[in-house]
Amino acid sequence: MLSVKSYPREYIDACRARLDSQLAAYRAVASNRTTTTDADEAFDVAFFNNLVLTLEVYFLHRMRGQEKKNGNPLNEVRVLAASMTAAEDVMTSDPTINLDPAKSILGYAVGDRIALDEERFVALADAYFAEIEVKFGPHLAP
């Protein structure tokens, strides 16, 4: 597939709606918990870490040059996804991206275990979609 310069409004909205549906399903299940067990916490981490991979796949073919390499939320998701798949949920670095933990959404440094919860994931997803809109939104279509 060719690199993508912009995504249609319908596509961005559909991706956001699918994500919102997954979050709603999680919330429905989590609201029935009377206590939170270690198994619940392990499930939550697996669920939200996997949603990061989902974000990356939705916009996988975005142009790297257009994304920039300045540590923005698109870069953060890219590095998180690569770290999760190649380093078993341990944060790694990408020498081509200037990702400063102090300025990132989640604050993970190289070597940190990646373990998201709902609040952290939603903050990341909101920032990610906002950045998609700015850098790849339909306003950029020819």
Image: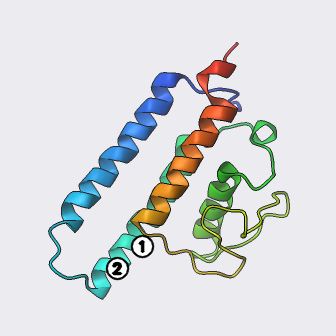
Q: Quadrant of residue 63?
A: top right
Query: What's the CA distance linking mark 1 and mark 2?
Result: 6 Å
Location of residue 75 with respect to 6 vertically, above or below: below
Q: How many marks?
A: 2
Depth order, front residue of 47/87: 47
Q: Residue at x 61, y 28 (%)?
A: 137
Q: Residue at x 43, y 64 (%)?
A: 119
> On the image, numbered disc 1 is attached to which residue?
45
Q: In which quadrant is the N terminus drawn?
A: top right
Judge whether residue 1 can be spotted in this image: no
Location of residue 90 with respect to 29 vertically, above or below: below
- For label 1, count other residues whose C-alpha is less than 10 Å away and answer few (under 14), some (14-19) or many (20+): some
| Residue 79 x/y as whole percent | 68, 61
Look at the numbered disc 2 and give the secondary structure of its residue: helix
Kind of residue at disc 2: Glu
| Residue 54 x/y as whole percent | 48, 51
Judge whether residue 135 can be spotted in this image: yes
| Residue 104 x/y as whole percent | 68, 62
Residues tagged 1 and 2 counted as in contact (Cβ below 8 A) = yes
Look at the numbered disc 1 and give the secondary structure of its residue: helix
State the scheme by which the image is colored: rainbow
Q: Is residue 94 left or right of residue 49?
A: right
Kind of residue at disc 1: Val
The single residue placed furthest to the front in the displayed view is 103
> On the image, numbered disc 2 is attached to which residue?
41
- For label 2, count other residues whose C-alpha is less than 10 Å away and answer few (under 14), some (14-19) or many (20+): few
Q: In which quadrant is the C terminus drawn?
A: top right
Location of residue 39 with respect to 102 vertically, above or below: below
The single residue placed furthest to the top in the displayed view is 142
Q: Is residue 88 left or right of residue 37?
A: right
| Residue 32 x/y as whole percent | 14, 68
